[in-house]
Image (cartoon, rainbow, N blue to C red):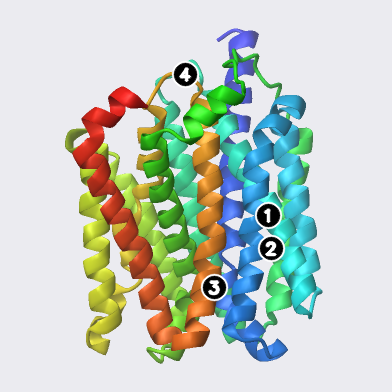
């Protein structure tokens, strides 16, 4: 192997490791909320609506970040975009851990959300750049999601154990900042230059056409409902299982990790069968199974409560499959289409935990959790059935 090929292989490896590390930390930090929220509510005397407002801040920041990160990333490059995301996340996490009033906690979560949104765009863009000339791009994008799920699973496990050992939720967040410092240092020392990529011509009419395309609007509803369901689930399942099912903080935190293990395993397994079944059909099967699983776990006898976190196994493929389906609508303006899709994902992330907090204050966490999550799932299922029935017509009119 000559020096040029060796340097290219090294750059590929270093860049890939950096992307995976950023998504592992993304999942880890984002899902500390679930295990820590119960302790935070008790310590600060907040109600569920207050907690919903805090969660809303995180996904408001995420929504803003995914809209502007693509533009910023083209200006400063993937390396510096990742560093920017890690710095914002570091500032938000530290600020959150030192806050004790609602407005400061909410503002800190906005900054956390900005960091998460920037890393979401940067990590995906980095993998797309690195494997632009390879038929392994899909494989590595799935592995990127795998590392996010891995962080999402490990984070609650560690947080639950620390809380059980009487470690403050504030200390847990400060400890996570150490990983962010490592990520910043890693990217500061790698040598990565953004490749020159041919860009689609975009004007206002293009944006309007894509935004109001019938098929895009239907997929936007799917992704909004999915993210609202997933984030609402992840943010509140620990509190729900403690308050309604009587589980301990340790076991309920393990349940959150099980939820993300299901997502991780489901994505890996379905990667082998998705092309054989078809995008829309497999999503209909998945969300139907999720509704049955969640309904049985939530309203059935206590002995089958374990079905609640197993819902993650069945909803696992919705996000990447929707992304793949939108990518195939047209070969033109794929980045813009995905940007619109991720923006609606951000809206779902804002609405899910916030609505769950509001509804739970009105009807209780026992019904609030189940009603909100099942409503998002039902909207998803109905929309996917509409897409399935009108797929041929819509694909001609997008």
**Cα distance, mark 2 to mark 4?**
40 Å
Question: Which mark, by number, is residue 332?
Answer: 4
The residue tagged 3 is: 34
Q: CA distance from mark 2 to mark 1?
A: 19 Å
Q: Which residue is at 35% across, 67% downward? A: 375
Q: Residue at x 36, y 75 (%)?
A: 371
Which residue matches tag 1?
61
The image shows residue 334, relative to residue 369, as above or below, that is: above
Query: Neighbour class for label 1 at 10 Å: few (<14), some, many (≥20)?
Result: many
First in sequence: mark 2 vs mark 1: 1
Q: Position of residue 80 (x, y in %)?
A: 76, 34
Q: How far is disc 2 from disc 3 in space, using C-alphas?
A: 15 Å
Q: In the rendered structure, find residue 176 and report the number of the disc placed on it.
A: 2
* Dot in front, 2 or 1: 1
Q: Is residue 135 visible?
A: yes
* Percent coordinates x, y for residue 143 in the rendering: 45, 41
């Amino acid at each position: 192997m000559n020096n040029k090929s060796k340097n290219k292989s090294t750059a590929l490896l270093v860049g890939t490791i950096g992307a995976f590390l950023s998504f592992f930390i993304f999942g880890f930090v984002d899902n500390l909320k679930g295990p820590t929220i119960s302790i935070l509510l008790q310590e600060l005397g907040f109600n569920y609506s207050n907690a919903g407002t805090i969660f809303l801040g995180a996904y408001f920041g995420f929504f803003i970040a995914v809209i502007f990160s693509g533009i910023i990333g083209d200006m400063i490059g993937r390396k510096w975009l990742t560093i920017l995301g890690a710095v914002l996340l570091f500032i938000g996490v530290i600020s959150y851990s030192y806050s004790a009033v609602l407005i400061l906690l909410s503002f800190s979560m906005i900054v956390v959300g900005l960091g998460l949104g920037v890393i979401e765009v940067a990590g995906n863009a980095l993998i797309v750049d690195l494997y632009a000339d390879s038929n392994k791009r899909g494989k590595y994008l799935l592995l990127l999601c795998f590392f996010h799920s891995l962080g999402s699973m490990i984070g609650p496990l560690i947080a639950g154990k620390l809380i059980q050992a009487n470690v403050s939720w504030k200390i847990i967040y400060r400890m996570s900042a150490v990983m962010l410092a490592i990520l910043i240092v890693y990217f500061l020392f790698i040598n990565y230059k953004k490749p020159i990529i041919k860009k689609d011509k975009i004007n206002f009419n293009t944006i309007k056409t894509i935004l109001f395309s019938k098929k895009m609007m239907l997929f936007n509803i799917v992704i909004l409902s999915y993210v609202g369901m997933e984030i609402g689930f992840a943010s509140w399942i620990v509190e729900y299982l403690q308050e309604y099912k009587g589980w301990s903080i340790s076991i309920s935190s393990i349940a959150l990790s099980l939820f993300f293990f299901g997502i991780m395993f489901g994505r890996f397994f379905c990667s082998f069968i998705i092309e054989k079944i078809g995008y829309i059909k497999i999503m209909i099967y998945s969300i139907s199974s999720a509704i049955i699983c969640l309904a049985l776990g939530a309203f059935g006898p206590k002995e089958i409560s374990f079905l609640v976190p197993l819902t993650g196994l069945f909803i696992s493929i919705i996000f990447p499959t929707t992304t793949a389906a939108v990518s195939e609508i047209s070969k033109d303006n794929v980045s813009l289409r995905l940007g619109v899709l991720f923006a609606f994902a951000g809206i779902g992330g804002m609405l899910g935990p916030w609505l769950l907090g509001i509804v739970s204050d009105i009807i209780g966490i026992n019904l609030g959790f189940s009603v909100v999550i099942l409503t998002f799932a039902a909207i998803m299922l109905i929309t996917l059935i509409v897409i399935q029935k009108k797929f041929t017509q819509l694909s001609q009119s997008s």
